[in-house]
Image (cartoon, coloured by chain):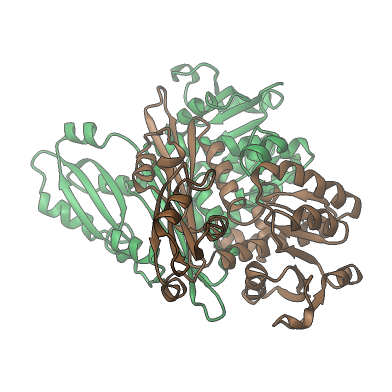
Chain colours: A green, B brown
Amino acid sequence: MSKIRIGIAGYGNLGKSVVLGIGQNRDMELAGVFTRRDPSALECEKAYHIDRAKEMTDDIDVMILCGGSMTDMPEQGPFFAGMFNTVDGYDTHAKIPEYFDAVNKRALESGKVCIVSSGWDPGMFSLNRLYAEVILPVGKTYTFWGKGISQGHSDAVRRVKGVKDARQYTIPVEEAVQAVRRGEMPELTTREKHKRVCFVVAEDGADRVQIEYDIKTMPDYFSDYDTEVHFISEQELKSEHGGLPHGGLVIRCGRTGKNGEHSHTIEYKINLDSNPDFTANILLACARAAYRLNREGISGAKTVVDIPPAYLSEKTGEEIRRLFI
Amino acid sequence: MSKIRIGIAGYGNLGKSVVLGIGQNRDMELAGVFTRRDPSALECEKAYHIDRAKEMTDDIDVMILCGGSMTDMPEQGPFFAGMFNTVDGYDTHAKIPEYFDAVNKRALESGKVCIVSSGWDPGMFSLNRLYAEVILPVGKTYTFWGKGISQGHSDAVRRVKGVKDARQYTIPVEEAVQAVRRGEMPELTTREKHKRVCFVVAEDGADRVQIEYDIKTMPDYFSDYDTEVHFISEQELKSEHGGLPHGGLVIRCGRTGKNGEHSHTIEYKINLDSNPDFTANILLACARAAYRLNREGISGAKTVVDIPPAYLSEKTGEEIRRLFI
């Protein structure tokens, strides 16, 4: 059986994890990594300049987009949808409908399948929010993120005057999680759901009191949260906070019965040593689905909620019924 | 918009919960309850003798089969598949492939969609075992059931000489769950995964030592487990153990990274006050999917892994992208 040939657009943390993930899926092979940088500078075989992708439409079954949601994907998503089946993790939640429509238009023209906004949130968490609501129509859904490194918040801290380097952990507030698990369906403010913990390396002679104040009062990022700021050495930042762990949970509480007397909770929880590795593996499962759907003559943009779960697996229907059902 | 007309075959705990569940879904209505008993004896409007179902194929969009897996469904599944879109929770795991094939044959002939083996296990747990494996191909999946009432094991205890009534709880062993959550991927025996706790009402003058011995040594049901037997009064059994709570969890631990250095866990956990209410609600979401798939010209047997999740929801694609993704 011929393998699914995977292309990767963008070679940051996520792109590198996709390369590793391909090795865990025996029905896939790496066809090329596409970069805007000088391909020879990448420590990767099969590196090409991104401009060469358009000449390789016969060599790649699915292109996985590993650029950023802010500037790369709004351009690359529709662009690659015109040439390839694609999978991406576009995660600017408010703009997903608009992005979906732009990709869908091009994918319908090219006859390709493009799975957008996959990964874990959006992605597996979206799926679980949907499944939980259809099972418990009368109820309330909560999403908690962390404990994990937030790239955007770490960047925000690094932009504060006097900060040399920093990492920011988003952490669910345990009391809130427990109240939700007990089925109490609490109304929770932003502050009550998550706290933020920053590990900061200050520049020599910087005003630490001012740094802490600047972080804690930063609008949008920190002012609505209880935030801890810890100053540590550059060495400690590297050794203790060098990874990209993450995690989170989706919980729905619902009620059934003649008078709502029965309480139920559904919880989906993930705990990840490596956010990019985990995300990459979800994108790869979606790549398999995109490839298989397209071979059946289907085209257009899809999200995880449009994919029959069996299409994500390399196993046959018979094997799935025997092994998983 | 016309509502989805739901038929219910069988009026035990599950059938009654389906009636209640219809009330939580504004796009559904009860079209009829079908019973082998005298319909006038049911405390239910729209009760019909099951022989009348075949005259009502124009009045029912989806028939939900609420009989038992042991004897009812092997006969009723293929029978109703010849007339209606159906949903069932057939749960004799070893015989699911055979049951699927029998239903599939009839559903293809009649042009109907029949979703088999839905509910939470098989059903949502099956889905989660599949999703977790495609995301973490290198890893190990564990399923724990409980804490909850096992109907089959309660029945087995009630058959012991000297037992007047009984309830049996299946309970995951907490140490095992914790080891799995820590990503240790332990090998677990039957005894190490679950324990069994029985609450027994003994007949007057019965030999309690003998009862306890007979339960704990019962092959298949108890001999492979650590089992607790508690004798209580009939009154206490009713007041403290009258419900049908259940629950359970599916956990997959997996590894990624160049040398498997990153550990990940995915956990799906449910906690239910009423097993039949929760199961009924899953069957109803599947009924919606069966109805919609069939209207698109699809036929044949399906399981939850074949259903695009969006088909379970009454919301449109646009609404789902805006609200869940």
Image position, residue A2 (x, y; %):
70, 21
Q: Residue at x 38, y 66 (%)?
A: A182
Q: Residue at x 77, y 70 (%)?
A: B7
Visible residue check, residue B104: yes
In this orientation, which residue lies closer to the viewer: A278 or B97? B97
Image position, residue A163 (x, y; %):
19, 43
Image position, residue B117 (x, y; %):
68, 52
Say if B120 sits above or below B140 in the image: below
- Residue placed furthest toward the left: A205
Visible residue check, residue B1: no
In the picture, residue A56 is in which quadrant?
Answer: top right
Number of marks in the image?
0
Image position, residue A251 (x, y; %):
45, 60
Q: Residue at x 71, y 46 (%)?
A: A300
B312 vs A239, left or right, is right
Say if B131 sits above or below B231 in the image: above
